[in-house]
Image (cartoon, rainbow, N blue to C red):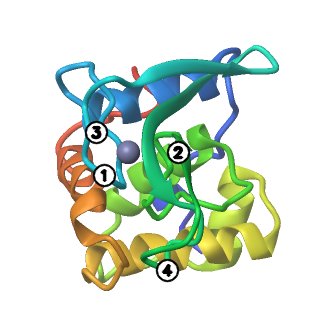
Amino acid sequence: MNGAELSPIYIPRKGAEILAREILEAARWPNGKPCCPVCGRHKPIYKQDRKGVKGYYLCPAPHQSDQSKEDGPTKPLVFTVRTRTIMERSHVPLDKWLYSMQILAERSDLNPMTIVELARRINVTRDGATTVFKRIDALRYSTVPHEEENQFLLVLMAKMTREQVFPPV
Ligand SMILES: [Zn+2]
């Protein structure tokens, strides 16, 4: 193994997850106004805290509780920067997602990374790394659900091939 070509192991700094969320939010909503990923509304959108954690947004418009039905009961929607993206329903923190995108963006197809390598670099389980790896791959090959909502991640990864976005230098 050629150690010199390997990306460094990620060591989270204090506040890294908050910083990662802010970078992702700025990339997804460049005008600073979160947009409901389901109905597309920009307002009113209310900011919410959950146990002191920021990054939750409420769209008060009626949304189908069961997305597969059209005439079921409706309710307001709480969303985050993860909603309808490859980061949705994943336990991997946002800073580790961003770091993974950064190191995978830097890798060429000729020098691929293995799941075991990625798991070591971001210090997650093999299962966690498998999810991150497969979903980033799907993003690059445009086989993700809600392609439109994931576009900002492709733009961010293109930027990552030219400069280090995360962690900021
Ligand atoms: Zn909405």
For the residues carrying marks 2 and 3, which lies nearer the camera in this image? 2
Say what amino acid the circle numbered 3 marks: Arg
* Circles 1 and 3: CB atoms closer than 8 Å: no
Nearer the viewer's eye, disc 4 or disc 1? 4
Amino acid marked by disc 4: Lys
Amino acid carrying mark 2 in the image: Leu
Asked whether, in this view, residue 9 is left or right of residue 111, the answer is right
The verdict on label 2 being within 8 Å of ligand 1 is yes
Q: What whole-number distance in Å separates the C-alpha atoms at marks 4 and 2?
A: 16 Å
Which comes before the other along the chain, label 4 or label 1? 1
Query: Residue 5, how many percent across, how many down?
Result: 45, 60
Residue that numbered label 3 is attached to:
28
> Quick one: label 3, few (<14), some, or many (20+) residues within 10 Å?
many
The residue that mark 4 highlights is 69
Assign a secondary structure to mark 4.
Answer: loop
Which label sits in the foreground, 1 or 3? 1
Which mark sits nearer the N-terminus, 2 or 3?
Answer: 3
Query: Which residue carries the number 2 mark?
Result: 77
**Counting residues from the N terminus, which is met first, the one under dot 4 or under dot 2?**
4
As helix, strand or loop, the secondary structure at mark 2 comes to strand
Question: Is 155 on the left-hand or right-hand side of 5?
Answer: left
Q: Measuring from the top left, give residue 149's x and y in whole percent.
A: 29, 58
Question: Secondary structure under badge 3?
Answer: helix
Quadrant including the C terminus: top left
Q: Which residue is mark 1?
A: 39
* Residue at the image position 42 percent from the left and 55 percent from the top: 101
Q: Are marks 1 and 2 in contact (CB under 8 Å)?
A: yes
Q: Residue at x 71, y 64 (%)?
A: 119
